[in-house]
Amino acid sequence: MEKQQHRLAFGTLVITSKLPDTMVHFTAEERAAVVSLWAKVNVELVGGEVLGRLLVVYPWTQRFFDNFGNLSSESAIMGNPKVKAHGKKVLTSFGNAVKHMDDLKDTFAELSELHCDKMHVDPENFKLLGNMILIVLATHFSKEFTPQVQAAWQKLTTAVANALAHRYH
Amino acid sequence: MVLSAADKSNVKACWGKIGSHAGEYGAEALERTFCSFPTTKTYFPHFDLSHGSAQVKAHGQKVADALTQAVAHMDDLPNALSALSDLHAYKLRVDPVNFKFLSHCLLVTLACHHPAEFTPAVHASLDKFFSAVSTVLTSKYR
């Protein structure tokens, strides 16, 4: 009887220690800012621009895309069909983050492992890409991309970058 | 990081187009920095940081004027920014990470106001330019 109680007590302790206390908390305003802007995003167009700009502005990021063909100039990169396709893929995945803002670590667990074990991507690159998303959104939404809207998106891209880095070892 | 002839030309052209808006953009970039990166506010405990603050407006103008000077002397940034470099190293001592935050928010501000001019190539040149300025401003830290 005593043993069972101990086990029960121990079990309770284990459960409580697993509660997510590292969750990012988004306010209602931040959620609204993210969701409402995302609804207007042309994922295919913006995705291509985001990845393209990453490769133009930070050329060393081209190291991950040896098989993408011509990346020799700004126009080559921005017009490259593989860049556009992959950009769309990446941003579509980012759309998942918008749907699961309270559960980013679990949502991106598998992708995190993939980026570490198969693609060997330095997590620093997630921050660079996140900032590219912000900048492309700024070019598309101008006055609508207020400091408050930017801050909400800044928080989201940082949280996604952290989630993607979470399973690294 | 070296600024190519194309970079310098891009930066000069872009900054020229901004013209008299530079101060306004400087203030907006600061506001964006304080909003997105709240830790940056620790350097301004003596400021009113609310939207439209006169102090932020004035400081934004200061930052913009310094950048205008930098644009005019891109071939010799260390000399042109020497006094500011001393100020940041010995008096202000702003942690180097913060220059990246402000640079990013300057880019966002320009992207918002001049999306057509803010092509990937111009974006790259400006990013490099702000990075070069940041390097000079932190060059005497130790």
Image: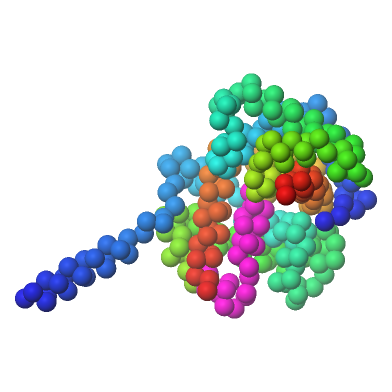
Q: Is residue B117 left or right of residue B142?
A: right
| Nearer to us in this view, A140 or A97 | A97
Q: Residue shown at 37%/56% (left/top)? A: A21
Q: Considering only vertical position in the picture, is B100 above or below B17?
A: below
Tell me the quarter of the picture where residue B12 sits: top right
| Nearer to us in this view, A149 or A63 | A63
Verify whether residue A130 appears in magenta: yes
Q: Residue shown at 42%/49% (left/top)? A: A25
Q: Which residues are drawn in magenta?
A: A112-134
Tell me the quarter of the picture where residue A101 sits: bottom left
Q: Considering only vertical position in the picture, is B91 above or below B47?
A: below
Query: Which residue in the rendered view is the most extreme toward the bottom?
Result: A118
Could you tell me residue A59's position as x and y percent? 78, 62
Q: Residue shown at 46%/60% (left/top)? A: A104
Query: Which residue in the rendered view is the most extreme toward the left?
Result: A1
Could you tell me residue B25's position as x and y percent? 72, 32
Colour pattern of the rendering = rainbow
Quadrant where the image shows the N terminus of chain A: bottom left
Could you tell me residue A89's position as x and y percent? 61, 65
Q: How many marks?
A: 0
Q: Examine the rendering and report whether any part of residue A148 can be seen.
A: yes
Q: Residue shown at 57%/78% (left/top)? A: A117
| Nearer to us in this view, A150 or B87 | B87
Q: Examine the rendering and report whether any part of residue A46 can be seen.
A: no
